[in-house]
Image (cartoon, rainbow, N blue to C red):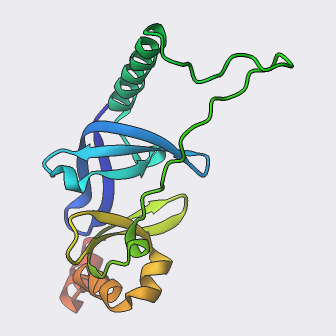
Amino acid sequence: MSNKKTKSEEPDEGPVEFSVEKILDSRVVNGKVEYFLKWKGYSSEENSWEPEENLDCDDLIQAFKESRKKKEAKEDSSGRRSKLKEASEDGKAVPAKRKPTSEKKLGFDRGLTPEEIVGATEQNGKLFFLMRWKNAANADLVPAEQANTKCPQIVIKFYESRLSWQTQDAKVESNDDA
């Protein structure tokens, strides 16, 4: 398996793929597993959360899960508390209380000003843009609907930069080849 993820489609070059160097963490958001990734060739400031279904690095995911299991087993054997408390009075297991995790705000939720769209991808049938922000190191995936309303000129610039016009001569040549 490769450790790549398709981020966007480029007209002449095919899909642009970013390589995952390491999986740092995982979480579940709205019932879907996401992984916090360190991208190969990028600084730690560019680390980002990505849904599991968008990733093509099964070997890294498996290695991450195995290392997490070993770490949890080591913590349990060293006398640390397990994830379940002792059985309650009625005999049923009760989950241990977790500290609330603060969701990391992304994109427009951080109050940042968009600089440019660097790529596009589809997730669950919806279009998302990879948006670079002014005065920020991280780029975030932003729903296209949100970008269309909050920064339409940047969206237009993104699409215009990827347009390629077919000339009349090229049309005639392609018809002759058929």
Give me the residue at 44% from left, 73% from top.
109
Q: Is residue 157 above or below residue 49?
A: below
Q: Give whichever of 153, 84 is nearer the camera.
A: 84
Q: Give whichever of 96, 107 is nearer the camera.
A: 96
Q: Residue furthest front?
A: 89
Q: Residue furthest top?
A: 77
Instruction: Report whether 112 appears left or right of 98.
Output: left
Give me the residue at 36% from left, 45% from top.
36
- Where the N terminus falls, by quadrant? top left
Spot occupied by residue 138 in the image (x, y as percentages of width and height): 26, 63
Q: Give whichever of 166, 40 is nearer the camera.
A: 40
Q: Is residue 50 above or below residue 165?
A: above
Spot occupied by residue 107 in the image (x, y as percentages of width and height): 38, 70
Give me the residue at 24% from left, 51% from top.
18
Spot occupied by residue 103 in the image (x, y as percentages of width and height): 48, 56
Number of callouts = 0
Q: Give whichever of 59, 95 is nearer the camera.
A: 95
Give me the residue at 50% from left, 48% from top.
101
Quadrant housing residue 96: top right
Instruction: Report whether 57 appears left or right of 126.
Output: left
- Where the C terminus falls, by quadrant? bottom left
Spot occupied by residue 6 in the image (x, y as percentages of width and height): 32, 53
Q: Is residue 141 above or below residue 112?
A: above
Instruction: Report whether 96 appears left or right of 44.
Output: right
Q: Is residue 78 above or below residue 30?
A: above
